Amino acid sequence: MSEHEPHYTALGRMLVAFQGMEATITQGLLLLLNSELGTPSGQLAHAAISELSFASASRLASLLPSIFTIERIGTSSPEKVKRLQEELEDCAIRLAEGLKLANDAEQLRNQLIHSFWFVGDGIVNPPGALMRMKTKVKARTLSVQFERESIADIDENTERAREAQRLVGLALQQYRVVSNYKW
């Protein structure tokens, strides 16, 4: 077993957590669009959502508070208006918190995945960390950065993705309940 196996395992956990979070967003959006997957319109909605990048799905989800409004849902009862407003505010707060975490997790995930990792014979890494190199071109300048990544750093992003999945999942479920309720 390689001395780097714990890092590889941590990276794998992070990727799986991120994929779960991404699936929660896309599947939640899909259910809001059309819950009848066996129908032609359901299949079309599924195909359209499946083509979205993470960034596009996140932007689409961020529109929900402007789409799910009291005016669009429609209710005339003052007590139902108050309850609906509370539900929509709760959805919007959870969704915003979850999407912030999700976008932060995606940014770090991309940094980790698109880096060159220094491993192999003759390469010495600090104890408990792996070195990675990120190369990018910004403003017509080449930027090369070296960073140490510990298992704890990677695990922190894994937990960020899991918490984002929980919050976004709850918000999307709540939007679905709100949309199906007879206000």
Image (spheres, rainbow, N blue to C red):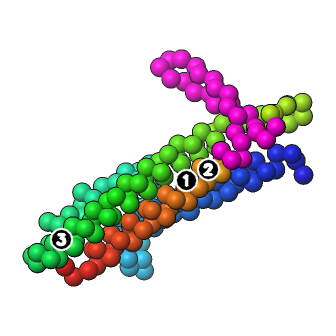
Residue at coordinates 43% horizontally, 62% vertically from top-left?
Answer: 168
Label 3 sits on a secondary structure element that is helix
Give residue 2's position: percent from left, percent from top.
88, 47
Disc number placed over residue 82 in the picture, else none: 3
Q: Residue flagged by tag 2: what amino acid is it?
A: Glu
Q: Quadrant of residue 72?
A: bottom left
Q: What residue would you read off at disc 2?
A: 156
Q: Earlier in the sequence, mark 3 or mark 2?
A: 3
Which residue is at the front of the view, 142 or 69? 69
Q: Tell me where the magenta segment starts and ends, as one range.
A: 127-153
When the figure is inspected, residue 153 is found, relative to residue 121, above or below; the finding is below
When the figure is inspected, residue 113 is found, relative to residue 182, above or below; the finding is above
Q: Quadrant of residue 78?
A: bottom left
Specify the quadrant that holds the C terminus.
Answer: bottom left
Q: What residue would you read off at disc 1?
A: 160
Assess disc 3: are there few (<14), some (14-19) or many (≥20) residues with their C-alpha within 10 Å of its C-alpha: few
